[in-house]
Amino acid sequence: MFNFFTELPYSIQALIACLFTWAITSLGSAVVFLFKKVNKTLLDALLGFAAGVMIAATFFSLLAPAIEMADKLNMLTWLVVSLGFLAGGLLLFFGDKLFDYITKKREKTQNSTKRIIMLISSITLHNIPEGMAIGVAFGSIFYGIEGATTSAALMLAIGIGIQNFPEGSAVSLPLRREGFSRLKSFVYGSLSGIVEPIAAVIGAILVLKVQFLLPILLAFAGGAMIYVVIQELIPESQANKKKNLMALFTILGFVIMMIFDVALG
């Protein structure tokens, strides 16, 4: 099965991987059919674990290959990778600022409606660079650079998928509390992740068609990932009363991703 998967075009591999992450988002949304709320410690542990996976993936699967590829293309490596990394973080930063501005302009909107819009929009926005990161990771395998492997790309997808579970429930459960039916809450929660497979295919195609974009896009995806980790995942997991335990889950996630990338890559 794995051999069959690796023989597929890289864009199709990225699509399949992100269909998996979308399925995890949908699975998270489906808890609305079972529970009124999900154990917060469990969700925080998953977020902490995903943060560790994504930090390791940012270096081993994105930044290190970006540096190597920029060297091979005789680029000014430190500048190209730095600008790409900053651009990824700034995209989400300004996206958050734009969203804050839009919501402030709607002060007269009902609080419940604003919360719904904020939930769906913010999670959907952050899913775009996550999907692109997976697409770029799979597309970069084509060039045979160190760190760019199928196992590393799959582990990246798994890490993003893990943190998509609480994101799905973070949309569907509040919608249910606001009076939406269980089915509508599930559908809206699930749809918040539909952009990931689309962004993944776009990222993979860009890398495969325009080689000089590879180090830029790898670094860009890394910057976006680190922004999500710092701004969302770690603060949310550390809000738990057992924050020391949550920190250990983050380290565990990093170690597991590092093992997959270094030992099995």
Image (cartoon, rainbow, N blue to C red):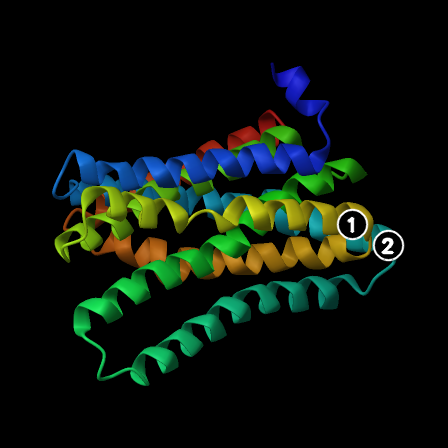
Identify the amino acid type marked 1.
Answer: Met
Q: Is residue 60 above or below residue 177?
A: above
In the displayed structure, does residue 28 sit left or right of residue 24? left
Residue 123, image x, y percentages? 38, 57
Q: Is residue 34 above or below residue 95?
A: above
Q: Residue furthest right?
A: 74
In the displayed structure, does residue 193 sit left or right of residue 65? left
Q: Residue 69's mark?
A: 1
Residue 115 at least partly seen:
yes
Give 42 or 33, whichever is nearer the viewer. Answer: 33
Examine the image and state in which quarter residue 34 appears.
top left
Residue ID at (21%, 84%) = 108
At mark 2, the secondary structure is loop
Q: Is residue 249 above or below residue 185?
A: above
Q: Residue 73's mark?
A: 2
Residue ID at (45%, 42%) = 160
Question: Disc 1 vs disc 2: Cβ atoms closer than 8 Å?
Answer: yes
